[in-house]
Image: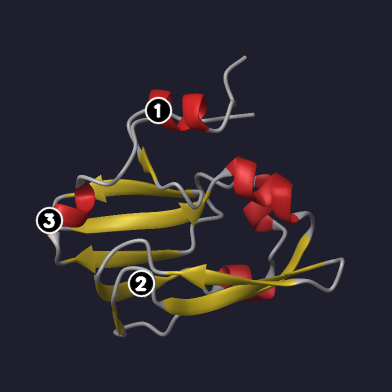
Amino acid sequence: MSVPVQIKYTRNHYWIRLDGDKAVVGLTEYAINELGLIVFIDLPDQDAHVRQGEFIGSVETMADDEHDLLAPLTGKIIAVNRLLERAAVLIHESPYDKGWLFMIQWSQESELEQLLEEETYEREFSLED
């Protein structure tokens, strides 16, 4: 299972690639494997202001299960990967590249301290080889 370095992780299995006050967000390969085959993704609205932990969308799996997407950071959604809504398979094929969910302009620097480094994420979820 891939856990790329130079990006951050959350305990609820989002990856976050920080670039100044912006961040690209996606689901980790671990989360995707745990969910099973994702067939539909409902993403947040662009320009929406969200608070960390707030419901922002959902994913539906082949097993007909629906799982909530919660905002990993507080801020404004500045871009959304609408391609995923038409081709959810991209999240399986390329979770850390083409399968990104959204970009957020974060506003609470203190929330960044809660993010995990790759080694910590691997250790906490027993993902090490």
Q: Which mark is residue 109?
A: 3
**Residue at the image point whose x is 53% and y is 74% from the top:** 82
**Gap in angstroms between the C-alphas marked 1 and 2:** 28 Å
Q: Is residue 43 visible?
A: no
* Residue occupied by mark 1: 120
In this image, 4 relative to 76: left or right?
right
Residue 6 lies, with reference to residue 44, above or below; the image says above
Q: Amino acid at mark 3?
A: Glu
Task: For label 2, count other residues whose C-alpha is less than 10 Å away and answer few (under 14), some (14-19) or many (20+).
Answer: some
Q: In terms of secondary structure, where does tag 3 sit?
A: helix
Q: Name the residue furthest top.
A: 129
Residue 91 lies, with reference to residue 53, above or below; the image says above
Placement of the C terminus among the 4 image quadrants: top right
Q: In terms of secondary structure, where does tag 1 sit?
A: helix
* Residue occupied by mark 2: 79
Comes first in the chain, label 3 or label 1:
3
Task: For label 1, count other residues whose C-alpha is less than 10 Å away and answer few (under 14), some (14-19) or many (20+).
Answer: some
Among the 4 quarters of the image, the one containing residue 36: bottom right
